[in-house]
Image (spheres, rainbow, N blue to C red):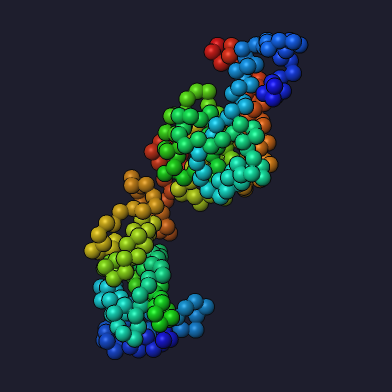
Amino acid sequence: METAEIYEKLKKTFTEGIGELKTNLPVNPFFFVDADKVNAICCFLRDEESLQFDNLSCLSGVDYDKDNLAVVYHLYSYTLNHQLVIKTTVPKTNPVVRTVSDVWVAAEWHEREAFDLIGVNFEGHPDLRRILLPEDWEGHPLRKDYKVPDFYNGMKVPY
Amino acid sequence: MGLLNKLDARIEQFESGNIIITSADKLMNWSRLSSMWQVFFGLACCAIEMMAASASHYDLDRFGIIPRPSPRHCDIILISGTVTLKMASRIKRLWDQMPEPKYCLSMGSCANSGGPYWEHGYHVLKGVDRVIPVDVYIPGCPPRPEALIEGLLKLQEKIRNQSLAKITA
Ligand code: SF4
């Protein structure tokens, strides 16, 4: 199924919380969904007979603009061989998104990475800890306003 | 007398007997430099070149360099790649576990100075010499196995010129 058809289907099922479809881009077509709807939409995408998105290819955190963080979901269906990209934004002041780790288990580590590097909080995640950086690291380094510390555990960081 | 052929020419060997005489320094240095066991670990892309150097084509074993699974068996530590801040404390710990005399080779730009991450690598230690002392720096990104071997030969040279008197002085 093409993204446009999937989009129409979603629009019919979820009357609100779905932004407009962006096409004719150098990247895959995508649309925004509301952060509090992500989990319900993902459940639908996985379970609906004609969609069957059985695979979360990638979940990434993005420092989107001055006030917002974003989470991007790349979905794929092995059964029906089609793909979909959805995004959601959350304000930097309160970056909370409902987890999708109960929809696709693969999301668990991806969400930990987005939390570690960008600082998105995934509500309902079973084990939201840093995954790459050391436990005692401060801040989320892929944020654009991140300042490299002068020292980490007594080791000088800048060149 | 295969081993003796590798010994320094200055070592005297009696013509007819199984006796050689040499100095304690020379014997110690010779045995140290001919069996530099290496801590069995690799860090990043440079580690691939290190593995290639250990494999049959370059055959580090011919210099007596073999990887050992415990730092307590080892004489040298090869820092083969990017030292992240997370790894740095582990490296320090491995180094502290190695018995003296011990030597450190820093392989590649990352271990020498942070390499490609020198400016924006918020998580990279800008040179392993910030946590442990380095004996030989090998430039390159990554250095070829030949360069690594050159570095190891330089280290052998360093050990060959050591003296017990100087170490304990
Ligand atoms: S020096 Fe180059 S090849 Fe070696 S670890 Fe760093 S980036 Fe990789």
- Give percent across and percent down for residue A58: 41, 68
Q: Front-most of A63 and B169?
A: B169
Q: Does residue A5 sit above or below B65 in this rendering?
A: below
Q: Quadrant of residue B63?
A: top right
Q: Front-most of B115 and A92?
A: B115
In the image as oriented, which residue stretches furthest toward the left?
Answer: A124
Q: Does residue B17 sit above or below A74 in this rendering?
A: above
Is residue B136 at all visible to an observer of this figure? no
Position of A94 with respect to B25 (left or right) is left
In the image as oriented, which residue stretches furthest toward the right?
Answer: B15
Q: Does residue B97 sit above or below B89 in this rendering?
A: above
- Give percent across and percent down for residue A126: 25, 59
Q: Front-most of A96 and B163?
A: B163
Q: Quadrant of residue A124?
A: bottom left
Report the residue at 66% width, 20% height from top.
B161
Q: Does residue B144 sit above or below B72 in this rendering?
A: below
- Give percent across and percent down for residue A78: 41, 77
- Give percent across and percent down for residue A130: 34, 53
Q: Front-most of B136 and A63?
A: B136
Is residue A129 at all visible to an observer of this figure? yes
Position of A77 with respect to B140 (left or right) is left
Counting every numbered tag in the picture gives: 0
> For the N terminus of chain A, which image quadrant?
bottom left
Report the residue at 47% width, 25% height from top.
B99
Report the residue at 42% width, 33% height from top.
B93
